[in-house]
Structure formats: structure tokens, C-alpha cells
Amino acid sequence: MKSIRAQMLVYLLGFIVVLFVVFAFFSLRQINEIPEYISVQNQEVAKARADEVSKELQGTIDLVEMLAQSSLIQSMDMDEIKVFLPTMVLEKHRNMTVSDITGQAWATNDLEIDISEQDQFKSIIEDGQKSYISSPFYSPFVEEDYPILTVSHRIENQGVTVGLINVVLTSVFLNEVIADVEYLETGFAYILDGEGFVVAYPNDEKDITNHMSDWIINSDQALELMKESQGSFVYDHSNGESYLIVFAEVEAVPSWTFVIEVPLAEAYAIYDAMLFYVAIGLGVFIVLTTIFAILYSRGISKPISGLIHSFELAASGNLSVRADAHNRNELGRAGQSFNTMIDKIKSLTYQDPITTMYNLNSFMLELKEKLSEASALAQETYICVLSIDDFKRINTLGGYEAGNQALKIIAARVLAFIRKAELAGRYFGDEMIVMLTVDQAETIEDRTLALIDALDEMVDINGVKYRINTSIGVSEIDYQDSDYHHAIHEATIAKLDAKRSDGTSVAYYNDAMNEALLREQMMEEALLTAFKDKQFYLVYQPIYTEDKMNIVGLEALLRWNHPMFEDVSVSEWIKILERKGMIYEVGNWVLETAIDQVITWNKTYDKSFFISVNISTIQLEDKHFFSTLKKVLETKKIAPELLHIEITETQLMNSIEDKISVLEGIKKLGVKISLDDFGTGYSSLSYLMRLPFDILKVDRSFVGNMFIDEKSLMIVESITSLAKTMQVSITAEGVETDAQFTRLKKLSCQYFQGYLFDKPMTDRVLSARFKNSFKK
């Protein structure tokens, strides 16, 4: 294959310089990273270029070592060597040389020379080194006016040194490597040896006779810094400017350092000048490629035109473009480099590092293309914002690594679900954003339900199984509206509405959601000061035995005194307290206040009332809850059996394994545990047998419907039967009629509470009642 490089050498060098400049500016604009990241990027370039130099040198080192170990070379039969050795000279080699131990040498360019005064001869023959790589030097035996370097190896025959073999390289290949490294307007690369002398320089401004001290102030300090394998630093130039240097060690020659240098001011001014340089770069690119097409045949210009098209698409923001890399010449390799660069840009700039999904920037760029395709097919398109519920709980229980693993698993399921014409990406935190398409044969409800099915599987993280619920908000995209952020905003509002439901749920945006969101925000703001302003208070509902007159305990219930939100259900603002993390402070206050009050009543009226306190599952998951509870018991000096804590069945079923161990610890303290709202959740019998509870509380919904719905009565009977089997007590909630009370007694319920007996009352009202009922 005739090399295109030989035909286009002069033009190609200029083209490559322009290409890399354009790519550098384009990449920086797309990456949009902070200026400090510049040095890190260039260290990677310096390391890659240093590795390239090292690879080239290592190949030559291996070749020389192989030749030195061949029997022909070891024989030192010069007649045969003169026939054999020229066949081993590669294109990048200037020549090879074989010398005896006196320094008399023969070179493959048919010269007989004396190398006894050269460094490689002294190092190998006189000093006994096995191999040697020289720094570039001007040889008296080389007619051309450029430096050379030698890679040498000792020749041994039966353990005796009989000579050495050299491969002589020009510094051209080094110059080719550093000539490709252009950064900004004046940035460039060069190579220094261990003493700071130039090994290779991109132009004739400096050569191997120059030392870094010629232009670097405090060069000794800079040289000391460059003893590291790679790094970067800022130095003051002799011209008065400051420069950024990034460097990397050439592994094959550890004393060599590959350096990229750019003026500091220029490095950090690139963002302001980027658009200008991109425009100029593209203009130059078009001019040069036009000249190139005129000068060369159609067969050569066609692949180049293809590359031009790829560059233009990339410059317009289309990072899905792929260059043709099938040409078996330098243009093919340029196409491969282009594709690799695009992939790296997309990965670094537009890929979320945890989930490997698109990040929001890339999602928005790709969204325009996807919507254009969907519009052409007359498909409806929707934005879905997907949020992982209780994500903080996973982080709390398993650490941030568990949270990241959960994100990866959910992301993998989402990506496996979407179609080729659809799009998914990471949104914020525990949220993902998805574009779904719907054709005439289906509805968005079909698609979202299918998405829920795809996500509705247990997640195993480090041996712990989690049931991950998701809340999904959906909004339709209007093709006439060029601002797609509007649809995303609506989907986000719908997602917030979905999160109000327990478990996995979907909400489809409507205008009423805006009002609900505004109301919830006002409620959140009010709750932020509610505790400080003492707006929370407790009411107490007595708990009776089958004797209506016999109060055995009380349930403490939290209330919020606020003029705007007095009618809001308790469960609604409790969820806000949990979400905002305020439940810990409020929950501890409820616990201590309720205990103080029951201690006062017991002491005043010589009673042994127990107090039942509702505990949020968020509190139960707090690693400090157990120690806090234990400390309260010790401080308040209340008998542990007089404290009952209530946990709702539905909340308990999430991550139940972790909660069982906490509940067992609480049980050992002597505190009674009630399973609240029993029958509304999905407890399996295997878990029920393991839960250390003392009391089952039958949910008020079943009690209230006992004589209306036959199924409710059957559930109540089943619960009481189960309680007898498990030998635990039963409390019936929401008892409002004598008929309910009578039937529940027959079913062997031990405790009763409800409006038939008492409504919840404040401590003041209840104290007045006790005063009349329990006179000493």
C-alpha cells in the first residue's frame, strides 16, 4: 500500500496542527470544566506522549537485545554480519553498528569507524553496563545536520564480552511526537534529560545544547520537581511571563521527561476566546481542505471530505457523529482518533460517572435529536422524572457505596427498558429523567406501568435485600414549545405529587398540582418554625379494658396548632417532618413529654397507667435512637413496661431485617412494642413470627366496617385468632358503638380505644377528669 503520508507530508502536518487546535478548543468548550482541570488534562496528554516515546524506544531496545543474543552477532564474524545486519535496519533507524572491544566498528551504511571515545562504548565495554541509551548528540560520523541517539547492548560469547551493537536513531521520530502537541496559541511540548538539557524541541529555536535554565528562572527547583514520575507546576520565564508546565517520565529512559508548556495567562484565557478561535479554526480548516481537494485526486479527497463533515457535525453539537475509520492509511487512523476523542468527550463531559447514563447536559442535547425523530414519526413524547423513595435510608443503612450501587442497578433497568428512539439520563441526586414515546397502538399509561414493572424487583446490595419504591412524574412534550424545560418542570411537579403516595406510584401532570405544591411549600415553611414557636402539643386517648370504667393506659397523639393548617391530616405533615429530618427532634420531644405526663398522673392518682407513643420508622432507623430511648428511661425513672412504642405495620416492612435487631434491643429493655394499624400492610407470617411485639392493634378501618363489610369482620376474626396463637395482646382501635365493643369482647380483645369511650383530650382536660374520677 502506497503511503498517503509520503504524498501529503507537508500538507498533512499543517492539517494535523489545525485539527488538533480546533479539537482542543472544541473539547474545552464542551467539557466546560474549571480552569484548574487544565493541568490534569495535559498530564494525561504528556503521559500518553511519553508512553509513545517509551514504546518506540522499547521496541528498539528489545530489537538490539535480541540481535546481541543471536549466535551470528556473538560470533563477531564481520563478513556474515555485513550481509545480515543491513536486513534488520528498519525505516526509523538511521543505521546499525557493530563494534569489537577495541572500538573498531562497522556501520550498515558501510562505514568503518572508531567509537572508542563514545559514551556507549565507555559505558558498556569499560564500565561493564549491559545496555545503554544515549541522549541525543551530534556525531562526527553523521553527515546530516541533526542529532542522533544510540541504543546499545553488550555482545557476549560464552560469558565473555566480545563487543557491542548499536542502533542509531535520528531525533526525527521524537520531533514528530512533540510536533503534534499544540496547546492554545503558543503552547508546545519538548523533552528534557535528567540534567535539564534539551532532548527534543518542536522547532530550531532550541537544540540539545540548551539547558532549561536558559529560559526557566529557578530551574534547579523546577528540575527537582520533575524528578516525580508526572505532575505540573507554574514557573517564571526569563521573559517575565508565568508558564504552566505539565510533565511525565519517559519510562524507557527514566532520566527523560516529556514536557508540555503554555503561558499561564493564555491557559486560563481560553474560555473567553474560545468562540473566536473555533470560528477561525473552522475557516482555516475549510480553506485548507479546499486547497487539498484541488491539489489531489478525487479518490484521496473523498475520505478527507468525510472527515470534514464529521468535524462540522461535532462542532454543531452533535456528539453522536462517527468518522469513517475504514481507510487503510493515515486517514483511517485519523478517523479512529476522532471517534476516540468524541467518545472521551462524551464520557468525560456528558456521562454520569456513577450510573454511566447521560447526565442532564447531554440528555438535553440528545433530546432535541430524539424529539425531531419522534415528530417525524407522529409519535407522542413524554418526559418522566423518576425518583427513588427513601434513598437516604439506603445511604444510612449501607453507606454511600450502597446508595451508588442502588443507583447503578436502577439505571441499568431503566436503560434496558427504553427503546432505541427513547432517552434516559441522570437528573439530580436520586432522580433520573426519561423521554418515552407513544404510538397509536398504546398509551402513556401502558408505557409507565411497563416501566414500573421493570423496576419492581428486590435489589440485593452486599447481601442485603431492599424493596426500592419509585415515584414517577409524567408530562407531555409540546412540539410547538421549543423550551423543553417547561415539560421537565411539570414532570418534576408531578413527581412530587406521586411521592405523597406510599410505595411506587405515577402521577400525570395537571394544573391543580401547582396549587398543591405551593400549599405544601407553605406548610414546610410553617413547620420549620413550629417546634421553636411551641405550636406542637399532645392529646391523649385513654385505652380501656373490657370494663368500660377501667383505664389502663393512654396513647399520646401529636397535634399542630396553626391557623392555616389546623385541618390538615396529621399523616400529611408528619411525612414532611420525616422528609425534612425534623422528626428526630419532634419525636424525642413527644417521647419525653408523654412520659413526664404519665408519671405525673400515676404519681398524683396512684395509678400505673402505661403510655403508648407512636415512633416513626425514620426514628427507628436512626443509629442513635436506641441509646436515646435507654437514656430517657434511665433519666425519667419510669418502669420500662409502662412505656409502649407503636410502629405501623406498613412502615415496618421496609428493610425489616435491620429493624428486627433494633426492636429486639428495645424489647430487652422491658419496653412493650405494639404493631399499629395491623392488617393494612403486607406482613408475611415468617416475619411476624420473628417480630418481638407484645400487642397487635387492629386497624380502625376494619373495626368500623365489621357490620358493613363481611370481609372486614373476617379479617378482625383472623387477627384475633392469630394473636391468640402467638400469645400476644390485642388492642382494637376506633371502637365507636356498643355493638362493636360487644363483638370485640367476644373475640377476646383485651384493650379498647375509640370515641365510644373517649376522644383524644389535652392534658389539662384529662387532668380535670382524673381529678373528679380518682379522688384520693
Image (cartoon, grey):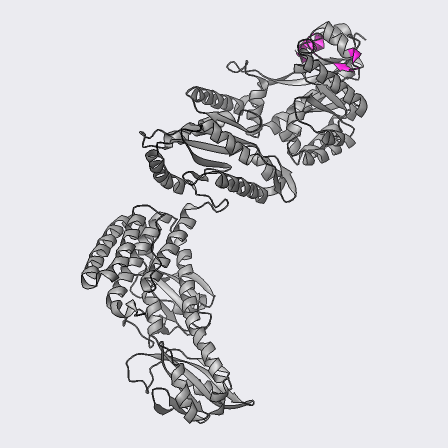
153 relative position to 503: left or right = left
The answer to whether residue 128 is seen in the rendering is yes
338 relative position to 733: left or right = left
The relative height of residue 749 versus residue 737 in the rendered view (above or below) is below
In the rendered view of the protein, which quadrant contains the N terminus? bottom left
Count of numbered circles on the image? 0
The relative height of residue 771 versus residue 498 in the rendered view (above or below) is above
Q: Which quarter of the picture shows residue 264?
A: bottom left
In the rendered view of the protein, which quadrant contains the C terminus? top right
Q: What percent of the width, then of the height, locates residue 564? A: 50, 14
The answer to whether residue 36 is seen in the rendering is no
766 relative position to 28: left or right = right
Q: Is residue 280 magenta?
A: no
Please tell me which residue is depicted at 43% across the width and 74% down the height of the picture: 57
Which one is nearer the viewer's eye here, 94 or 528?
A: 94
Which region is colored magenta? 745-768
Q: What percent of the width, then of the height, locates residue 324? A: 33, 56
Which one is nearer the viewer's eye here, 624 or 97?
A: 97
Which one is nearer the viewer's eye here, 269 or 234?
A: 269
Q: Which quarter of the picture shows residue 721?
A: top right
Q: What percent of the width, then of the height, locates residue 151? A: 43, 80
Please tell me which residue is depicted at 58% across the width and 39% down the height of the picture: 395
Which one is nearer the viewer's eye here, 113 or 605?
A: 113
The relative height of residue 493 versus residue 296 in the rendered view (above or below) is above
Q: Which quarter of the picture shows residue 540?
A: top right
Q: Is residue 759 magenta?
A: yes
Q: What percent of the width, then of the height, locates residue 472? A: 49, 30
Please tell me which residue is depicted at 25% across the width and 67% down the height of the picture: 8
The relative height of residue 203 versus residue 532 in the rendered view (above or below) is below
